[in-house]
Amino acid sequence: MTEKNKPSESLSSGNAQKGNQSSLRLSTLTQAQLKTLIVQAKVQCKGGELPTYIPLLAKADPSWIAVQVQRIQGEKIAVGDIGCSFPLMSVIKPFVLLFLLEKLGSEAVFYRVGREASDQPFNSLAQLQADRGKPRNPMINSGAIALAGRLPGKDGASCCETLRQWLNQRSHSQLVLDEAMLQSVRSLPNERNHAIANLLAASGYLDHPEIALDTYNHVCCLSGTVRDLASLGMLLVQGSNMISPQHRCTVNDILITCGLYQASSRFAVEVGLPTKSGVSGAMVSVVPSQGAIACYSPALDEMGNSLAGLFIVQQLAQGLELSGLG
Ligand code: GLU
């Protein structure tokens, strides 16, 4: 364990003890502790890159950090730049999966996409070729584009709107489509995603590649604050009677092994919380039976995960003993 990964003193001392009594350890976290963690993240998480292939993402301020923790028991806590609004990008992928599981059922969904981990980059064409055109999982672009093609609607905008309304209604979030971000996504050709959509169509996993790709671009531009993201995360936490427990578990299981690009397996071992990140710097973690942690900080590590987001969730998971795996 590196110095950076050691659980923060301020968390590991008091809360774990309380946790043994209540077993709902996220509920013991205080606003002051979360504030301290943000200060530490600012010191520890220097450097990091902003993605340039979506020009508007490169305009974010890399020093922004916002965190919201929402608990089944206990109030919400939010600290940092909580007014920042950001596009979810790949963080929307588990919620596309959840929507389709609820609407179409597991068999129809997993006919089009697998549930195996991939150690290739999120937009790998080689992985899709190696798998003979069947996407390996719903958290990489090939799987998400294949599933975007199953959202109901006549075009990208209407498919995205159906998903947006469903998510806002079920989670009480206020996601909006960021039109400027969508324009920015479209401003540079994304040849890799085009090639993925075409191969999916050629191998029979996609009917209308152009619409599916446009839908995928739209849903990646659904935007909100950490408050909205934490509310979305709560859909994956036990206790929501809006979602079938079986579908919720399916999404969480896939997130454990596939949620953080090539860092997924390392994070699963070290942290053990279902988590999804996106290239905007958004990140959401599910703490089963306890709550959700939403982070936003746009500076990314070399795999595309938010540096501060990873640090904060790692500290919380270790300091409060949140992982059910230990
Ligand atoms: N729209 C982005 C892309 O396909 C999302 C990527 C991500 O957040 O991982 O490149």
Image (cartoon, helix red, strand yellow):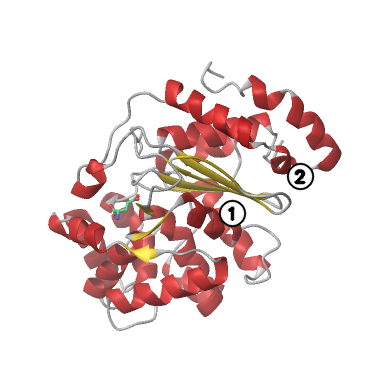
Location of the C terminus by quadrant is top right
Residue sitting at x 69%, y 42%:
26
Image position of 140 (left or right of 69) = left
Crowd band around label 1 with a 10 angstrom C-alpha radius: few (<14), some (14–19), many (20+): some
- Describe residue 239's horizontal placement relative to residue 146 as left or right: right
Residue located 36% across and 69% down the image:
148
Q: Where is residue 10 in the image (x, y as percent from the top left)?
A: 66, 23
Q: Which of 152 and 105 is in front in this view?
A: 152
Residue at label 2?
A: 24
User: Residue 153 occupies which quadrant of the picture?
Assistant: bottom left
Extreme residue in the right direction: 21
Question: Relative to 87, does residue 270 appear above or below in the rendering?
Answer: above
Residue 157 spot, x, y in % from top left: 29, 75
Q: In this view, does 244 lie above or below 153?
A: above
Residue with the mark numbered 1: 253
| Location of residue 157 with respect to 43 vertically, above or below | below
Q: Is disc 2 surrounded by few (<14), some (14 to 19) or many (20+) residues within 10 Å?
A: many
Residue 221 occupies which quadrant of the picture? bottom left
Say left or right for 286 vs 262.
right
On the question of residue 137 being in view, the answer is no
Residue 141 image offset from top left, x and y in percent? 34, 56
Give residue 34's quadrant in the image.
Answer: top right
Lateral position of residue 174 relative to residue 32, left or right? left
Kindly state the secondary structure of the residue where label 2 is placed.
loop
Q: Which amino acid does label 1 sit on?
A: Asp
Disc ID at residue 43: none
In space, the residues marked 2 and 1 are separated at their CA atoms by 21 Å
Identify the mark nearer the N-term, 2 or 1: 2
